[in-house]
Amino acid sequence: MRVYRLSLILCISWFIFLCLLHYLSARPLWLDEAFVLGNMQNLGFREMLSRPLGNGQAFPRFYLIAVKLFSGNFTCHVLFLRFLPLAAMLSAFFVWGRVYRYRFGDKWVFLLGLYAWASSYYFSYYAAELKQYSMDVLVVGIFVWFILHQGRIEDKQPGKIFIACAIFLPFIILLSYAGVFIFWVAAYNFLMISRKNKTVFPLFLVYTFNCLFAAVLMYRFDIIYAFKQQGLFIYWKDYFLCRDSFYCFFKSFGEGVERLGTWWFTANPILKKIANLFIPFFICPLFGLGIASLRKNRSKIDDMESVGLLMFAQLFILGILKIYPFTGERITLFLAPFVIFTVIKGIDYFKKPNFVNLALRSIFFAFFLMCGLDSLLRYLKLYR
C-alpha cells in the first residue's frame, strides 16, 4: 500500500511538474496563438458573438470571452493568456484519473493508465497553449464521468447533486466544440433508464431541453460563423476522409487510425514509430469491447468501451462528410484518454499466461517512461 501511494503521488507530481515546466517557460506566442490574441484585442465582446474570427481561427466564443476577461486584467501577459488552458488540463487530469480509477478496478492497472496520461507529450504541451484543446479534454471527461454514474439511478431516485449536475451540465458545451460529440449521450441514457424507472423521465425532459437550448446558443453565437471560415476548411482538407476512390479512402482511413492511435504520446519521430506497435491494442478492443458492451447493456451507452466506440464512429461519419477532421491531431486530442484506456484493456486481454501480460505492461510502461523523459528534455530546451 505504501509503494502504491508513493507511486500515485509521484505520478501526479510528474504531470503537474511537466505542465508547469512548460507553462513557466513563457515561450513566445506562436502563429495561431498570436491570431487568437489579435481577435481578443481587436474584437469587443459583442463582436465575438456576431461575426467570424479573423485569420481563419475557430475558438469556442464563450471560452474566448472568459480568457479575454481573465487575461485583460493582467495586460494580456503570456502567462495569464495561457492560465485557463493550464487550469483546464490540470483539472482534466484529475477528472480522467477518477474515470480510470472507476473503470479499471485494479489499482495497479489504473496507475499504469495514469502514468501513460501523465507522460503523454501533448497533454502537458497543450496545458500551456492559448488554444481550446485542453478544455476539450476536460469537457469530454466531465461528460464521461457523469455518464458512468447514470447507471446508479436505474433502481433508485437520483440525488440532489446528481439532479443539479444534470440541469447545468449541458451548458458546458459552450466552452468546447468537442462537447457536441458526447453531450447528447446522457439524454439517450436517461430515456433508456426511464423505461425501467419512470421517476427519471422528468429529468430526461429537463436535460434534453437544456441540451437543445445550449445547442441553439452555440449555433447562433458560434458555429454559424465557424462554418464560414473557408480558410480553416482548406487547411484541414487533407485531414478529412477521402471519397475519390477506394484506394484513397483506405489510405486516408489508415493514416487517420495511425494518428488517432499514436499522435498523442510523443513528438519524437523514433518513439512515434515504436507507438505503432500499440495500434492493434487500440483498434481491435475499440470495436470488440465497444460492440460487446452495447449488447451487454442493452444498447445503453454507459461505459468507456461504448462511449469510445461512439466517439470514433462520429469522427468517422463527420470525416466522410468533410465537416470535422477524422485524421486530425490536436483537434481530436479529446480522444486520447480513450486511446490509452483501450490500449490497456487490449493488453489486459492477454491475462494468461501471466508473464505475457506482465511483459506487455512493462513494455507499455517503459515506452511512456521514454516519452516522459523526451517531454522533459523538450521543455528544458525552452529555458536556454
Image: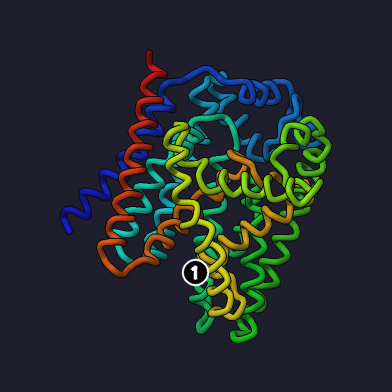
Residue that protrudes farthest toward the left in the picture: 2
Please name whichever residue, 27 or 317, is drawn nearer the observer in this view of the structure: 317
Residue kind at label 1, given as amino acid type: His
Residue 47 in view (yes/no): no
Residue that protrudes farthest toward the top in the picture: 384
Please name the residue that numbered disc 1 is placed on: 149
* The C terminus - image quarter: top left
Residue drawn at x 59%, y 33% is 131
Indicate the quadrant where residue 350 lies: bottom left
Please name whichever residue, 139 or 331, is drawn nearer the observer in this view of the structure: 331
The image shows residue 198, relative to residue 55, as above or below, that is: below
Q: Looking at the picture, how far across and down is residue 167, in whole percent?
A: 62, 63
Position of residue 356 in the picture relative to residue 50 (left or right): left
Q: Looking at the picture, how far across and down is residue 87, in whole percent?
A: 47, 39
Label 1 neighbour load within 10 Å: few <14, some 14-19, many 20+ = few
Residue drawn at x 69%, y 50% is 250
